[in-house]
Amino acid sequence: MPKIGMRNVKTAIAVFLCVFISRFFKMEYPFYSGIATVIAMQSSVVESFTAGKIRMFGTLVGALIGLIFSLIILIVQYYVV
């Protein structure tokens, strides 16, 4: 039987903590935090932190673009109707 590496243990602990915190705050879909954790996990803490920052920035940019398009649609509907 192959040995379990420390990276696997680190990832499991990180996913457990994220899902636990999500459940504590009663989030609707806590497994998304676990998926995000697995995606952001890298070989070192610095790389993981950098990947997390990039992911948060991308999410923020996507949310802002969605907000802008929603406002444009509302304005167009207001003036057209």
Image (cartoon, helix red, strand yellow):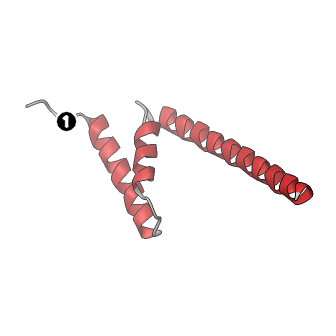
Label 1: element kind: loop
Q: Quadrant of residue 19?
A: bottom left
Relative to 2, residue 25 above or below: below
Tell me which residue sits at (83%, 50%) in the image.
72
Q: Nearer the viewer, residue 49 or 74?
A: 74
Q: Quadrant of residue 7?
A: top left
Query: Does 51 sit left or right of 38 as displayed?
Result: right
List the single residue furthest toward the right.
79
Q: Total of numbered circles in the picture?
A: 1
Residue 45, percent from left and from top: 46, 37
Q: Position of residue 74 (x, y in %)?
A: 81, 57
Dot 1: few (<14), some (14–19), or many (≥20) neighbours within 10 Å? few
Residue that carries the numbered disc 1 in the rendered image: 4
Position of the N terminus, as image quadrant, is top left
Q: Hey, what amino acid is under mark 1?
A: Ile
Say which of 51 and 65 sits in front: 65
Quarter of image, res 58: top right
Residue at position x 32%, y 49% from top? 13
> Residue reaching furthest left?
1
Image quarter in which the C terminus is found: bottom right
Q: Is residue 46 left or right of residue 61?
A: left
Q: Is residue 25 left or right of residue 74?
A: left
Estimate the x, y position of residue 70 in percent, counting from the top left: 76, 52
Residue at point 12% right, 30% down? 2
Most distant residue in the front direction: 81
Residue 25 against residue 16 in the figure, above or below:
below
Q: Considering depth in this image, is 46 or 78 the residue closer to the camera?
A: 78
Question: Which x, y percent locates residue 79?
Answer: 92, 56
| Image point (48%, 36%), residue name | 48
